[in-house]
Image: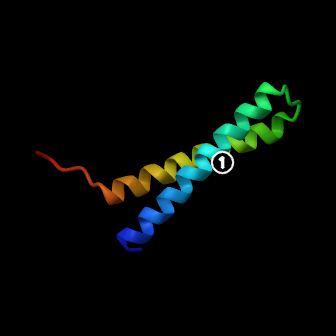
Amino acid sequence: MNEQELTKKLALMRTEHRDLDAAIAALTEAGSSDQLQIARMKKRKLGLKDQIAIIEDTLLPDIIA
């Protein structure tokens, strides 16, 4: 993937991560009894966070000064 494709994918993943966060908060506040669904959403959110970190590291490599 080139840099432009990675940047686009990163933006989409950040949006999905933010949407999952909002959905989890809404379900929790509503007192949802579907703990399995909430757990799956949290697991997906953590997976996205890891993938986002990998792409960010690819786009902005550490520079040793």
Q: Residue at x 64, y 39 (%)?
A: 21
Q: Residue furthest left?
A: 65
Q: Is residue 30 left or right of residue 7?
A: right
> Residue flagged by tag 1: what amino acid is it?
Arg
Identify the residue at the far right of this view: 33
Figure quadrant of residue 38: top right
State the count of labels. Answer: 1
Residue at the spot 87% in from the left edge and 35% down from the top edge? 34
| Residue 33 to residue 46: above or below | above
Q: Name which quarter of the figure residue 32 lies in.
A: top right
Q: Quadrant of the N terminus?
A: bottom left
**Image point 89% across, 30% down: which residue?**
33
User: Where does the image place residue 59, in percent across and percent down from the top left?
Assistant: 33, 59
Q: Position of residue 64 (x, y in %)?
A: 15, 47
| Left or right: 25 as drawn, with respect to 57 | right
Indicate the secondary structure of the residue bearing disc 1.
helix
User: Would you name the residue on which mark 1 appears?
Assistant: 44
Q: Nearer the viewer, residue 11 or 1?
A: 11
**Residue drawn at 37 percent across, 74 percent down:** 2
Above or below 31: residue 17:
below
